[in-house]
Image (cartoon, grey):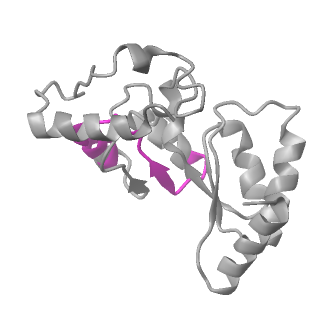
Amino acid sequence: FESEKAFFEMVSECSKRNVPFYLTMNALKISDAQRPVVRRMLEKFQRSGGTGVIFSDLNILEDICSFGLKPVVSSCAEVINHYTAKLYQEEGCKRIIFPRDITLEEMKEIFHKVPGLEYEMFFMNSGCRFTDGHCLGMHATEERALCEYCDQYARDFYRHDGCRIEETEENLLLEQQNQFSGL
């Protein structure tokens, strides 16, 4: 968006058309000094007709709920077991987005042990082992990956379930990685 005003106009337009609009706040840590700014943004978002907030830092959950916005647990919050899912459920969350690197078996276990939540998953990942809450630096910037790990080990793909990566799967990951190389 070219401006904050344009952003909130878009939120308002979506609201008028009954289209849900979620704001994503994926900062892994929001400091106490940043919370007043976050609260002002949440208030404007709510007044504009926003639906909910996808968040990572549990410290802002109370702020999200105080404006009547639906809290959605981000993949960056790293819900990797049923204990974490249960904690978010007990805090009032109804929807969780699984981290990209969680296996289907792990998802099934969480789903069965913590029913009553909406779950969302990513179908395909970029192939980087440091996505979401485990990222070592910013990626796809003009300066390239800050961590330089991805540049050094560009073809270091693996699967979390221990299965061998098929050639077609690896080719797809390489193609996708090449798309984002050199940005």
Quadrant (top left, top right, bottom left, bottom right) of the N terminus: bottom right
Residue 159 pos. (x, y %):
22, 28
Q: Is residue 107 magenta?
A: yes
Near-viewer residue (148 or 181): 181
In the rendered view, would you say 7 is above or below 172?
below
Question: Residue pushed farthest bottom?
Answer: 17
* Residue at x-position 77% and y-position 60%: 2
Residue range of the region highlighted in magenta in the rendering: 90-111
Q: Nearer the viewer, residue 168 or 15?
A: 168
- Whether residue 95 appears in magenta in the rendering, the answer is yes
Instruction: Please give the name of the residue rendered at 81% of the width and 60% of the height, measured from the top-left corner.
Output: 3
Asked whether residue 49 appears in the rendered view, the answer is: no
The x, y position of residue 169, in whole percent, is 17, 39
Estimate the x, y position of residue 38 in percent, counting from the top left: 81, 46
- Left or right? Give the position of 29 relative to 4: left
Q: Is residue 18 visible?
A: yes
Residue drawn where x is 10% and y is 34% of the image: 167
Count every numbered label the image shows and give the total: 0
